[in-house]
Image: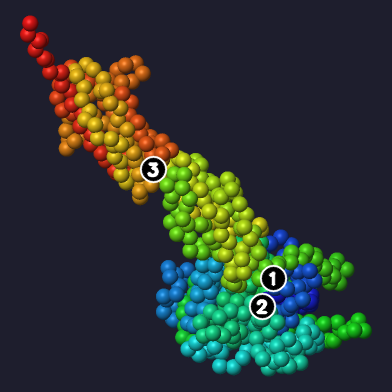
């Protein structure tokens, strides 16, 4: 009886007694469960137009009976780590068979990796598994997690259940005339065809395997962008699995019970539930209904509910009609629902100012089933102050994903300012998925710098050096334009501290400067300002260092001109 069913209203003593008992169990246990959504307080949900995780013409359980057993009113103490408790710890009802518990926790981890925003708790899968099949009939599974024989619901032949004609040729349920719910999580074949998973890696999607079925149920519950940490979304998810408020209350009570503590028991030794509830039969074509079955003696209390309060005249008050609950909004099928957005192999994003990034930002979109999602708009946005833009001069571009789910942004063109920036990829509208990539622009570099001539640079004390100094910076043999160069006048290149005497540049006020920050031109050339000598003769050095570490040392000489003897008379 698993997900996405068109469940008819079920009225009468059975529903009232079970719903009341569920409320009592929750109140007595003081379980930490989120409240039911508004409008889910009475009466079963109508299936028409209700929320589902799969296609609207699909069904999943067809009114298969489910177990209405409620957890004990006295719940086990909350353990520090429930999975490591010995089998004897806590109530027997809190024990979950080892393979079944492992399947629920594996499904939680798998979904967290592909749809972390859903926040699927494994205890919800355990609650549904308890209500659907008594944890695979007490954990009767083999070493691979497969039940020795199929767990089958009744034939969905329209006699008390939905009418669903065969959709699988009997491949899963052995019935070539009508469908039946199959497996520990009770999927009908048509729903399994959409949601089936291979969680144990054996190459098969088997509804009778607890690992496969638990993951399928987890993805189904998360469909439509639900966040199961939100009470309203959790209620909608459970109701999409079975459109019945009675079912919702029963699952909620087990969910709260398992949240308070569980422990692992050996496979095959789990507590078996009593007989499942039986829904009221469907109306016959003539407008009459077949007799309503008596409440199961296994229901809480084992008795029929007492009539309502007596009227003053001695008669009993009529039972008030339940307030109709608006059906949840339909959920898109999983193939059309964005499940995750992941990096599709983008490497480090680094480029030199003014250059083009070698790497292009690429993401892969997957749907709620984990399959690649094509034709999905993905928006890429550059954020930062480096001046970096996508090819074409745009900061934002939108790209459709390809058949393999990948969407690749245009090439990035680095700006002229060095520094860090980010590129963000965003997809989806109901609950968008985003990925953010760190990127950086480095300053332009030169790996070599040389003088363009080799003239000796000599000046007399207090005079200007007559010859201008010109240099050329290159990077990998090509002219390095826009490269920052630092020029420093020192006394000794081995001790490159700024000198306090000797040659110097001048600032705008004519004061001496012995360090300058310069930049190469478009051809990689650097023409130094005029150099002046002071009154201190000697040999000095000019050291020029580029961004990138290239260095050149130029010798400067300050000496007085030689005096010549006047010619003899």
Of the residues under marks 1 and 2, which one precedes in the sequence?
Answer: 2
Residue at position x 45%, y 59% in the image? 347
- Determine whether the residue tagged by mark 2 lies in a helix, strand or loop: helix
- Callout 3 environment at 10 Å: few (<14), some (14 to 19), or many (20+)? many
Q: Are marks 3 and 1 in contact (CB under 8 Å)?
A: no
Q: Is residue 562 left or right of residue 273?
A: left
**For the residues marked 1 and 2, what is the alpha-carbon distance in whole angstroms?**
9 Å
Which residue occupies the extreme front position in the image?
569
Q: Secondary structure at mark 3?
A: loop
Point 77% across, 84% down: residue: 164
**Residue lying at 77% horizontally and 76% vertically, measured from the top left:** 57
Q: Is residue 182 above or below residue 334?
A: below
Which quarter shows the N terminus?
A: bottom right
Q: Which residue bears the numbered disc 2?
A: 194
Q: Is residue 255 left or right of residue 66?
A: left
The residue under label 1 is 333
Q: Quadrant of the C terminus?
A: top left
First along the sequence among labels 3 and 2: 2
Residue tagged by mark 3?
480
Q: Answer with the quarter of the image where residue 489 lies.
A: top left
| For residue 116, above or below residue 12 | above
Asked whether the beta carbons under mark 1 and mark 2 sit within 8 Å of each other, the answer is yes
- Residue pictured at 15% horizontal, 28% vertical: 539
Image coords of residue 309 (percent x, y): 79, 69
Q: Mark 1 or mark 3, which is nearer the start of the sequence?
A: 1
Callout 1: 10 Å neighbours few (<14), some, many (20+)?
many
Q: Position of residue 60 (x, y in %)?
A: 70, 79
Q: Nearer the viewer, mark 3 or mark 2?
A: 3
Q: Within 10 Å of the Cα at label 2, are there few (<14), some (14-19), or many (20+) other Cα atoms?
A: some
Q: Can you give x and y, in whole percent of width and height, for residue 340 in the image?
A: 57, 64
| Residue located farthest toward the right when viewing the structure as drawn | 286
Q: Quadrant of residue 463 in the image?
A: top left
């Amino acid at each position: 009886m698993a997900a996405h069913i068109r469940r008819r209203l079920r009225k009468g003593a059975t529903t009232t007694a079970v719903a009341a008992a569920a409320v009592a169990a929750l109140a007595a246990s003081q379980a930490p469960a989120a409240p039911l959504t508004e409008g889910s307080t009475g009466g079963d949900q109508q299936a028409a137009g209700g929320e589902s995780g799969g296609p609207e013409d699909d069904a999943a359980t067809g009114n298969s009976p489910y177990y209405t057993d409620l957890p004990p009113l006295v719940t086990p103490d909350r353990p520090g780590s429930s999975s490591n408790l010995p089998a004897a710890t806590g109530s027997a009802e809190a024990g979950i068979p080892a393979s079944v518990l492992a399947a629920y926790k594996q499904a939680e981890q798998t979904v967290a990796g592909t749809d972390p925003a859903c926040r699927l708790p494994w205890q919800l899968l355990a609650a549904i598994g308890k209500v659907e099949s008594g944890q695979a009939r007490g954990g009767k599974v083999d070493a691979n997690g497969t039940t020795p024989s199929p767990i089958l619901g009744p034939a969905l032949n329209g006699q008390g259940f939905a009418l669903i004609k065969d959709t699988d040729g009997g491949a899963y349920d052995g019935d070539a005339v009508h469908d039946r719910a199959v497996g520990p999580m009770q999927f009908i074949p048509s729903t399994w065809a959409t949601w089936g998973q291979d969680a144990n890696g054996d190459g098969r999607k088997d509804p009778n395997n607890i690992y496969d079925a638990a993951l399928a149920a987890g993805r189904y519950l998360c469909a439509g962008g639900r966040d199961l940490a939100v009470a309203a979304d959790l209620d909608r998810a459970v109701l999409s699995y079975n459109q019945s408020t009675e079912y919702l209350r029963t699952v909620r009570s087990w969910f709260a019970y398992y949240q308070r503590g569980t422990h692992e028991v050996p496979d095959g030794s789990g507590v078996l539930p009593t007989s499942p509830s039986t829904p009221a039969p469907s109306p016959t074509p003539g407008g009459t209904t077949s007799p309503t079955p008596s409440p199961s003696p296994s229901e809480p209390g084992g008795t029929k509910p007492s009539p309502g309060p007596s009227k003053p005249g001695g008669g009993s008050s009529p039972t008030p009609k339940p307030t109709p609950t608006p059906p949840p909004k339909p959920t898109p099928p999983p193939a059309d629902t964005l499940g995750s957005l992941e990096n599709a192999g983008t490497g480090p994003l680094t480029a030199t100012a003014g250059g083009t990034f070698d790497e292009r930002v690429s993401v892969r979109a997957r749907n709620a089933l984990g399959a690649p999602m094509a034709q999905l708009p993905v928006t890429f946005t550059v954020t930062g102050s480096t001046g970096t833009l996508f090819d074409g001069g745009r900061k934002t571009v939108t790209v459709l994903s390809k058949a393999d789910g990948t969407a690749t942004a245009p090439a990035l063109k680095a700006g002229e300012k060095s520094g860090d920036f980010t590129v963000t990829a965003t997809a989806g509208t109901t609950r968008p998925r985003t990925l953010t990539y760190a990127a950086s622009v480095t300053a332009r570099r030169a790996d070599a710098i040389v003088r363009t001539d080799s003239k000796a640079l000599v000046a007399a004390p207090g005079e200007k050096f007559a010859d201008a100094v010109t240099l050329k910076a290159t990077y990998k043999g090509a002219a390095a334009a826009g490269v920052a160069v630092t020029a420093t006048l020192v006394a000794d290149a081995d001790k490159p501290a700024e000198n306090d005497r000797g040659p110097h540049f001048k600032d705008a006020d004519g004061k001496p400067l012995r360090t300058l920050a310069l930049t190469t031109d478009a051809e990689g050339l650097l023409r130094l300002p005029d150099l002046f000598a002071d009154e201190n003769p000697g040999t000095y050095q000019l050291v020029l260092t580029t961004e990138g570490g290239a260095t050149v040392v130029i010798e400067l000489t300050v000496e007085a001109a030689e005096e010549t003897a006047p010619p003899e008379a």
